[in-house]
Amino acid sequence: MMGDLFSSEHMVRPATAPGMTVENAKCLRYTVDGEMLARQGAMVAYRGDLRFERKGQGVGGMLKRAVTGEGLPLMAVRGQGEAWFAQEAQNCFVVEIGPGDEFTVNGRNVLCFDATLSYRISTVKGAGVTGGGLFNSVFTGHGKLGLVCEGSPLVIPVTPESPVYVDTDAVVGWTAGLSTSLHRSQSLGSMLRGGSGEAVQLVLQGQGHVVVRPSEAPPHKAQQR
């Protein structure tokens, strides 16, 4: 068979080691030897002896997801083989989390992760219970976390002298060491007159990095997180 489709640019290469790798800009590959976790419905192909099982979040997790709209609909992937994961052709990235690290990420951006990582759903401090993206998943442990992002993400350094203000629908995640609060950039009178559409931002202060996607979530996608 000939043609550009069958060129080395698109051809899957043999796996060299177990675990997560970037197959291309839109897809991650996981060579499974035991167990890993992924977003339900994110598997686009696999080969080998693999089993896919829905992973429950427990009663507490389901209740929190019902209240906050945040959560990770996960499946466990067990066995030996290879699986490929993608989400609506979004760009894929890998974050390596080490002992003592903590990475807070919006649940809509999580694609897959090592079973050695643990996560909890957490309220963003200072954000109350209104607005988008204010309940996030906090990952700790040791392993790789696969993320998706609409467009190329911006990684912005945060320092004590230079806090960063982020639209709550555009934030992907941030590293440990940052505190959060809400900032209202419009007066009530301006909001009543229509305003600029940028009324409230998430403020990140401290020492670390914040990851931002170059677009805001359409309302229907924000509701599906």
Image (cartoon, rainbow, N blue to C red):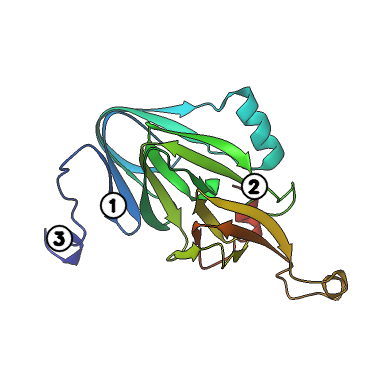
Q: Position of residue 148 (x, y in %)?
A: 43, 53
Q: Position of residue 63 (x, y in %)?
A: 68, 30
What element does badge 1 sit on? strand
Outermost left residue = 1
Crowding around mark 1 (Cα neighbors within 10 Å: few <14, some 14 to 19, many 20+) is some
> CB atoms at circles 2 and 1 under 8 Å apart?
no
Q: Determine whether, in the image, residue 214 is placed left or right of residue 94.
A: right
> CB atoms at circles 1 and 3 under 8 Å apart?
no
- Please tell me the numbered disc located at residue 124: 2
Given the image, on which type of amino acid does mark 1 rest?
A: Val
What element does badge 2 sit on? loop
User: Which residue is tagged 1?
Assistant: 22
Nearest to the observer: residue 210 or residue 14: 210
| The image quarter in which residue 193 lies | bottom right
| Residue at 50% across, 48% down | 176
- Please tell me the numbered disc located at residue 8: 3
Q: Is residue 158 above or below residue 178?
A: below
Q: Is residue 60 above or below residue 194?
A: above
Given the image, on which type of amino acid does mark 2 rest?
A: Val
